[in-house]
Image (cartoon, rainbow, N blue to C red):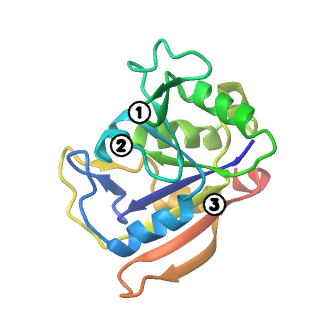
Amino acid sequence: MAEAGIIVAMTKERLIGRDNDLPWHWSEDLKHFKATTRGQTVLMGRRSFDSLGGKPLPKRTNLVVSRSLGAEAGADGLEMDGVRVFGSLAEASAWVTREQPDGAGGLWILGGSTIFREFLEPLDGEPGAHLSLGLPLPRRLVVTWVPSVPVLPDDVLFPFDEHWIDRHYEAAERRLGETGELEFVTYVLRDRASST
């Protein structure tokens, strides 16, 4: 299967979304996102897809998980306007495994918070717990750390804090943005035996 990774922009307070949109606009982050995911498979929940204007990201295979829209989709998903809709993460992951059996390309998980949680919670369980869920473990976690923004009551937060990330991942590459206000960090999954 294609190697899975998560890509997310967030503040140190874990803020990732507000009113179904990003609470900031950094063109440098958007360029980084496009360069990282272009030509690969991206997977997101329906609300994240809606936040993109309900249109597929160009030059990518777009997978959307929607329990309502994908309820009758079946194992191959439902092709709708340039995206493939699935009723569950397990069905979407199984499709990627069938379509990319040799690991060609990559699978990028775009969120939102519920999708991130489902992929990452198995790291707190027994090794191999993700296999029973039919989900790959995200080996890479690509974070754009953006400057702090005050968090409001209905804001969407990344489900795990920086301490949790450091416990399960290690920073493999760091670079500051051109203005120095953004930090781009690529984390790689730690050896499971040493992270428990």
Mark earlier in primary sequence (2, 3) = 2
Q: Amino acid at mark 1?
A: Asp
Tag 1–tag 2 contact (CB < 8 Å): yes
2 shown above or below 91: below
Q: Residues within 10 Å of mark 2 (few under 14, many from 20)?
A: few
Q: Amino acid at mark 3?
A: Tyr
Q: Amino acid at mark 2?
A: Lys
Q: Secondary structure at mark 3?
A: strand
**Looking at the picture, how far across and down is residue 117, in whole percent?**
49, 40
* Residue marked by disc 3: 169
Tag 3–tag 1 contact (CB < 8 Å): no
166 shown above or below 154: below
Quick check: can you spot residue 95? yes
Nearer to us: label 1 or label 2 = 1
* Residue marked by disc 2: 55
The answer for how far apart the CA atoms under marks 1 and 2 are is 8 Å
**Looking at the picture, how far across and down is residue 95, in whole percent?**
65, 30
